Image: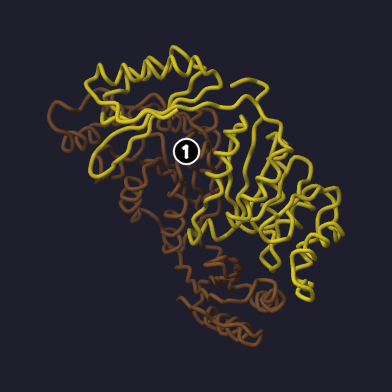
Chain colours: A yellow, B brown
Amino acid sequence: MNKATKTAGVIIIGNEILSGRTQDLNIAYIGKELEKLGIVLAEVIVIPDDEETIIDRVRSYSRNFDYVFTTGGIGPTHDDITTEAIAKAFGVKLFRDPEAVACMESYYDPGTLTEARLKMADIPEGASLIDNPVSGAPAFQINNVFVLAGVPSIMQAMFDALVERLVSGPPILTASVCTNLTESKLADGMKQIQDACTEVSIGSYPFFKRGKLGVNIVLRSVDESLLSKQLALITTLIEETGGSVLEVQR
Amino acid sequence: MNKATKTAGVIIIGNEILSGRTQDLNIAYIGKELEKLGIVLAEVIVIPDDEETIIDRVRSYSRNFDYVFTTGGIGPTHDDITTEAIAKAFGVKLFRDPEAVACMESYYDPGTLTEARLKMADIPEGASLIDNPVSGAPAFQINNVFVLAGVPSIMQAMFDALVERLVSGPPILTASVCTNLTESKLADGMKQIQDACTEVSIGSYPFFKRGKLGVNIVLRSVDESLLSKQLALITTLIEETGGSVLEVQR
């Protein structure tokens, strides 16, 4: 990867993800969006709604990555402790942000903006708001940390609203080849192709579909011509090994 | 939680999860199974296929949790580097395990057990095998680390095969209530109910379904009578707040 490429870390906050009660969908969404932007998602951590843990992980991720995204724990109830923990992580206080209150006033019917809801307008000092077109209460950014909702539809809208703040790198281009051969038949050939050109990373993902074995081979690079060259070598390898190229995606 | 309760950490290894190309399903599966066993899943980390990162995280998770589960990177191709990295994490060498070879011989047709496939019989010294009823090549356990496949169907079969090695705690009981009220209306009441009894954790998860807002409230405890008591308080709260209890699950 280019040394100028920005890195990101994601912190998924929520007991419901760790207990398996809720299937996480945010990792894959953020991963895909960052790839389009040429930003490398380097690490994801899933942690419980526990203040000390949130403070510790937010501090280390903020130091280690260019951008950090958290999801979950910014609603109005007793188990929504993310905002307060993040303020503590950066040693600042919460204040009721008039701009956040105004966002919420324009979203809620008159008389329904209760004190519990207004808790969502309490933002760490020094944070800037991120628009929430779905449910009113804004997300926020403090330093390099973007603090987003856990519900996927809301998180996605917030992510789309913050994208313009990120410095993109050269987009990471991908190509994939699907074949009916099993991984092990291609292993030696793929290793040779990979070793000859480290600028294109080659991943190999076996699958079982309708009782058939096969493999998806995924190539990733910021260099289009090298990507095409390596893709051609892989398809030739598949054919020479006696397999069929079932599908190629660019 | 009871001090005797065992904790677990999960390490999801794979570029394809971080890029969003593959939707992870293993976190939720392992989380649910551990909950049934009364083992607390304390943290999950998703990391790339990078040797140094794997070594570092496996060492720290092995120290910090009673049990560690890794998924991904144990196949036959060049990007399957988990087994070697785990051997390095524990300072041992790989050896071709005759028992693993025998498992694979009984699975593969004669003549199809290639050198690439046999790479999957190379196991760290001191590890014990975990049966793979789906695709032959076994998983393994070294110290408190269980090293499993990434493909969900295979991972699940391996997990089921290792369960008897885990020391269970008192099972974590759950109950949930679904209501048409929004979170913010219940926030104060839920906080009071939670604060009065910390042995039952109460989580609040808003949803949007068919254009309707609502909330799932999830209660978790190892104590059945306290769980029932808190559940009754929550349903009373919902009714007194003017909402409907749409569904109760035990």
Q: Is residue B61 visible?
A: yes
- Counting every numbered tag in the picture gives 1
Horizontally, residue A145 falls left or right of residue B43, namely right
Horizontally, residue A58 falls left or right of residue B88, namely right
Residue at 51% from the left image edge and 40% from the top image edge: B20
Question: At which x and y percent is residue B105?
Answer: 17, 33
Q: Quadrant of the N terminus of chain B?
A: bottom right
Q: Nearer the viewer, residue A51 or B250?
A: B250
Residue at 53% from the left image edge and 49% from the top image edge: B65
Q: Is residue B92 visible?
A: no
Horizontally, residue A12 falls left or right of residue B51, namely right
For disc 1, the chain is B
Q: Nearer the viewer, residue A193 or B159?
A: A193
Element type at mark 1: loop
Residue at 37% from the left image edge and 28% from the top image edge: A248
Residue that mark 1 sits on: B21
Crowd band around label 1 with a 10 angstrom C-alpha radius: few (<14), some (14–19), many (20+) = some
Question: At which x and y percent is residue B14?
Answer: 47, 36
Q: Quadrant of the C terminus of chain B?
A: bottom left
Question: At which x and y percent is residue A225?
Answer: 50, 14
- In the rendered image, the residue lying farthest to the top is A196
User: In which quarter of the view is residue B77 placed?
Assistant: top left
Q: Nearer the viewer, residue B162 or A110?
A: A110
Question: At which x and y percent is residue A195?
Answer: 43, 15
Residue at 60% from the left image edge and 66% from the top image edge: B206
- In the rendered image, the residue lying farthest to the left is B110
Amino acid type at image mark 1: Arg
Above or below residue A174? Residue A88 is below
User: In which quarter of the view is residue B179 placed?
Assistant: bottom right
